[in-house]
């Protein structure tokens, strides 16, 4: 088996439970808080979000059963997804002692890991009799995933899409519209916060924090609507744990294990998804492993942020969450990997960063080196990855070269959070391809 570069789990090995690292933290996760003034944000969320997701949000259970209907949707969407050994990239890098692996979340109907929680959230929303899912999106991957999940479950989908990206990803826009979604460039005229921001700057580039505010406001004012968040919150990371749980089984099949797990991090859903099941076993003293989150200097929430309570959105509709944050109203320059441009990191990831288990690195906002890493990956492994995933690959390569130079034997696992088939404009721009 270990001669093959692809390590595949059979469908009957698809995990039956999601993992919740909150059960294994050495101290309880700091709970969400109400701000000192204004209306209750908890009550607001209670009315605006899917009930089952909110229950999972507060759960300290280690294992949460995955309903059979969702497992069936996961299989329809191509799960379990393979793990690969990057032998061709290893060869190009001249690695003798370091083994590189990658998990294939790009092999997804909409192109990223985001379907793992989109399907769960859409399923729970339809079971609760909701008619419409409302959301934010940055890269467009989350909006695509939720449009797809809503369509499969017979729900409508309304997407507020960061204007800076909406403008240039016209193919992703078509993708969402093919799935019957209504897509607004954010800030938009659909909401009060959007109107305020557009009055100040008619070409406002938007941000994920603004798009979240718009989505929450819209969902709260339209009957049958619920708000679905694509990252940051505990229930999202719980759904994404399917990535790491599969990877744990795949490493058992080849009798190897990662010494380092690397993922890109915007809000923390793909990083949390791959890292937290492994981190849980570290916390339970069942394995040794390190964790590295790769970010942009445009939004280095784990690298330069403060660990404190902050809002999850620009308008302050959410409760306060304890997380590494740059400040919920901080302006961040648009980048091509716009899914990484969020002011704060998930509370679960932040808690583990604070305890020293997770490390982070940020790459320059001109993105040249990460796109070059993605090109090397494409030219050796043959897979064109999303701009966001390029950060994980860049960090994986850097760590591999460092270990090799130090003569260390090491296995490194990178998460490929998405494919780049709809990101060719970004590749053209960053690599100067005419
Ligand atoms: C392909 C891909 N990877 C990573 C991210 C970053 O988000 P998160 O940190 O929640 O995984 C995004 C966000 O849009 C994305 O589209």
Image: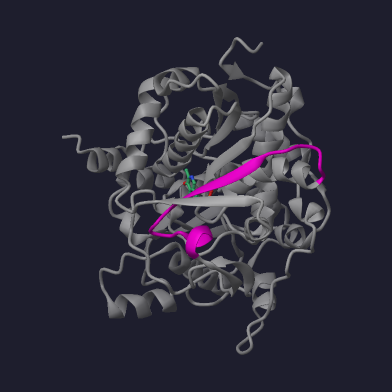
Place of residue 253 in the rendered image (x, y in percent of width and height, measured from the top left): 72, 19
Place of residue 374 in the rendered image (x, y in percent of width and height, measured from the top left): 38, 34
- Residue at 35% x, 52% y is 364
Residue range in magenta is 284-304
Asked if 303 appears above or below 252 in the picture, the reply is: below
- Residue at 55% x, 74% y is 221
Q: Is residue 293 magenta?
A: yes
Seen as rendered, the residue at the extreme front is: 406
Quadrant for residue 76, please give it: top right
- Residue at 76% x, 63% y is 58
Q: Nearer the viewer, residue 151 or 259?
A: 259
Q: Nearer the viewer, residue 138 or 286?
A: 286
Q: Nearer the viewer, residue 385 or 216?
A: 385
Q: Quadrant of the N terminus?
A: top right
Place of residue 152 in the rendered image (x, y in percent of width and height, measured from the top left): 59, 41
Seen as rendered, the residue at the extreme left is: 434
- Residue at 60% x, 28% y is 411
Q: Quadrant of the C terminus?
A: top left
Asked if 106 appears above or below 267 in the picture, the reply is: above
Say how the picture is coloured.
one colour
């Amino acid at each position: 088996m270990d001669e093959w570069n692809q390590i595949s789990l059979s469908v009957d090995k698809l995990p039956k439970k999601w993992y919740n690292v909150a059960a294994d933290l050495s101290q309880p996760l700091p709970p969400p808080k109400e701000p000192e003034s204004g209306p209750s944000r908890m009550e607001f969320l209670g009315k605006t979000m899917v009930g089952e997701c909110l229950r999972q949000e507060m759960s300290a259970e280690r294992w949460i059963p995955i309903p059979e209907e969702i497992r069936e949707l996961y299989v329809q969407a191509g799960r379990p997804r393979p793990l690969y050994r990057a032998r061709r990239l290893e060869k190009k890098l001249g690695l003798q002692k370091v083994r590189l692996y990658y998990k294939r979340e790009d092999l997804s109907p909409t192109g990223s890991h985001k379907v793992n929680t989109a399907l769960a959230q859409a399923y729970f929303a339809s079971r609760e009799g909701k008619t419409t899912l409302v959301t934010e999106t940055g890269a467009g991957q989350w909006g695509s995933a939720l449009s797809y999940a809503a369509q499969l479950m017979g729900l409508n989908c309304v997407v507020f899409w960061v204007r800076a990206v909406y403008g240039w990803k016209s193919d992703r826009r078509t993708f969402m519209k093919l799935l019957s979604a209504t897509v607004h460039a954010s800030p938009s005229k659909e909401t009060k916060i959007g109107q305020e921001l557009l009055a100040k700057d008619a070409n406002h580039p938007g941000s994920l924090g603004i798009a979240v505010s718009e989505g929450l406001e819209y969902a709260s004012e339209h009957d049958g609507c619920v708000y679905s968040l694509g990252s940051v919150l505990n229930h999202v990371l719980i759904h994404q744990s399917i990535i790491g749980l599969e990877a744990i089984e795949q490493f058992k099949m080849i009798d190897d294990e990662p010494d380092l797990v690397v993922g890109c991090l915007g809000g923390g859903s793909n990083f949390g998804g791959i890292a937290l099941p492994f981190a849980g076993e570290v916390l339970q003293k069942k394995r040794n492993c390190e964790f590295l989150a790769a970010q942009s200097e445009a939004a280095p929430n784990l690298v330069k942020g403060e660990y404190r309570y902050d809002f999850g959105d620009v308008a302050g509709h959410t409760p306060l969450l304890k997380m590494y944050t740059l400040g919920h109203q901080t302006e961040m320059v648009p980048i091509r990997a716009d899914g990484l441009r969020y002011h704060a990191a998930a509370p679960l990831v932040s808690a583990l960063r604070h305890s020293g288990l997770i490390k982070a690195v940020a790459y320059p906002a001109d993105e040249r080196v990460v796109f070059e890493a993605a090109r090397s990956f494409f030219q050796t492994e043959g897979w064109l990855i999303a701009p966001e995933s390029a950060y994980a690959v860049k960090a994986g390569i850097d760590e591999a070269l460092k270990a090799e130079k130090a003569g260390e034997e090491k296995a490194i696992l990178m998460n490929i959070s998405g494919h780049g088939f709809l990101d060719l404009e970004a590749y053209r721009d960053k690599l100067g391809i005419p």
